[in-house]
Image (cartoon, rainbow, N blue to C red):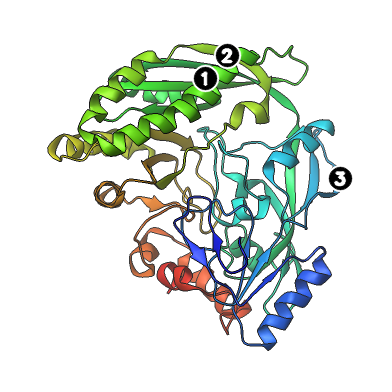
Amino acid sequence: MDQQTWHNWAECASASPRRYATPASVAELSFEIARATTEGLHVKCVGAGHSFTPVAVTDGVLISLDNLSGIKSVVHTEPAGALVTVLAGTRLRDLNPMLWDLGLAMTNLGDIDAQSIAGAIATGTHGTGARFGGLATQVRALTLVLADGTVVECSPEENSELFEAARIGLGAVGVIATLTLQCEPAYAMRAVESPDRLSAVMERIDENSRGVDHFEFYWFPHTDRVLTKRNTRLPATTPLEPVGRVRGFVDDELLSNTFFEGVNRVAAQFPAAIPKINEVASRALSAREFTDRSYRVFASSRRVKFREMEYAVPVEALPDTLREIDQWLGRSDFRVAFPVEVRFAAADDVWMSTAHGRDTAYVAVHQYYRRDHRPYFDAVESIARAADGRPHWGKLHSRTAADLRPTYQRFDEFCSVRDKYDPSRVFDNDYLRQVLG
């Protein structure tokens, strides 16, 4: 943020708030929210700004949670896990090594670790793994600051309605100050990455998604080529064999960031060349295998800026969804250099979770930030909507409350909790009016 304007990471959302606050304690956070309410100002909180939607945009008080960081307490549970209470602004890239030093780990993680833990939870961040839920399923209790500055504890046993709404709350019912996470004993993971064909992967999709702890793949549009990632959980005592320094620099820095940035700059100027570029790039991929701490395997560096839309579809709808995207690309003159990312999650009971009540496949589409994403995203959204897809709350989409309500069984209950705890809409903004009404 400069002196006047805040931008998100992807530079597709910005805000010029009346005031910018950086509380360093829960008491200071409470004071800032109560003060804003008294002044008739809206309040939104921001962590890393990694949401593509304007979920954090406000014309009132923008509160950074960066100074609310660290682990508050650890209570060991049986069997061998722990309840870990964490301050809301703690970045995942900082939290994971701290947990490892305690002999602990989160059950599942996404592939980016720049986010604050509260921001990741509030927007429904997830990883991959057909037996595992998103990050919100790991939350066991929350401390929230309400619109009048009141600090409230909530859990399944205390203020349970508020807890259910706030687990993925979009910042609409209160500001998360602390989260208590159910962590498990630290574990290593063996990563096996290899090129394959989309047709072959889809023929074995149940075996791939359910037979591997954490499976995902990247499909290169305009080709039948994919990169698969199979991550298998191992005891923390397993000897680690991380990616070598040279191989890691070449694969993760040069190819995935520096070279990929260059490819996208060329593609932006010469989009007709993209199918050939994708074919060459996909064939240039080589297999690799390594074993490392779980959080190091989950996360990867992403420095090439892009726009992203992700839809959660019933897992049985995945084959048709990908087939229809491929057919649309074949019919249109639109060219896409970014791979399509496909991940998986177990059904959960979180009210506003994209995996609520159904086993889920996630289809994420991306476009380089210097190119227009709208024709592509609009087409994919139409395809996903026909399969009762649910958009990721932190990624671009055009859905509204009217058409989101039918796909979320607890939508009206969520809105009722919002009415109860923020009747004057202190935490409101244009995005929440769009998706919640």
If the image is split into quadrants, where does the N terminus sit?
bottom right
Amino acid type, mark 3: Val
Question: Which residue is identified by label 2?
Answer: 247
If the image is split into quadrants, where does the C terminus sit?
bottom left
Question: Where residue 393 is drawn, which disc sits there?
Answer: none
Contact, CB < 8 Å: mark 2 with mark 3? no
Q: Residue furthest left?
A: 331
Q: How far apart are the alpha carbons under marks 2 and 3?
A: 40 Å
Residue 174 placement, left or right of 335: right
Other residues around mark 2 within 10 Å, as few (<14) / some (14–19) / many (≥20): few
Amino acid type, mark 1: Asp
Measured from the top left, where is residue 153 in percent x and y? Answer: 77, 66
Between marks 1 and 3 in the image, the one whose residue lies nearer the viewer: 1
Measured from the top left, where is residue 269 in percent x and y? Answer: 27, 37
Question: Which residue is identified by label 1?
Answer: 251
Measured from the top left, where is residue 195 in percent x and y? Answer: 40, 15
Badge 3 marks a residue whose secondary structure is strand
Q: How far apart are the alpha carbons under marks 1 and 3?
A: 39 Å
Badge 1 marks a residue whose secondary structure is helix
Question: Which residue is identified by label 3?
Answer: 75
**Which of the two labelled residues, at mark 1 and mark 3, occupies the earlier sequence position?**
3
**Which of the two labelled residues, at mark 2 and mark 3, occupies the earlier sequence position?**
3
Q: 130 and 303: which one is in front?
A: 303
Q: 197 and 314: which one is in front?
A: 197
Residue occupying image coordinates x 47% and y 47%: 355
Compared with residue 1, is residue 325 higher up or lower down, i.e. above or below? above
Residue occupying image coordinates x 34% and y 60%: 398
Q: Is residue 162 visible?
A: yes
Contact, CB < 8 Å: mark 2 with mark 1? yes
Compared with residue 413, is residue 323 higher up or lower down, i.e. above or below? above
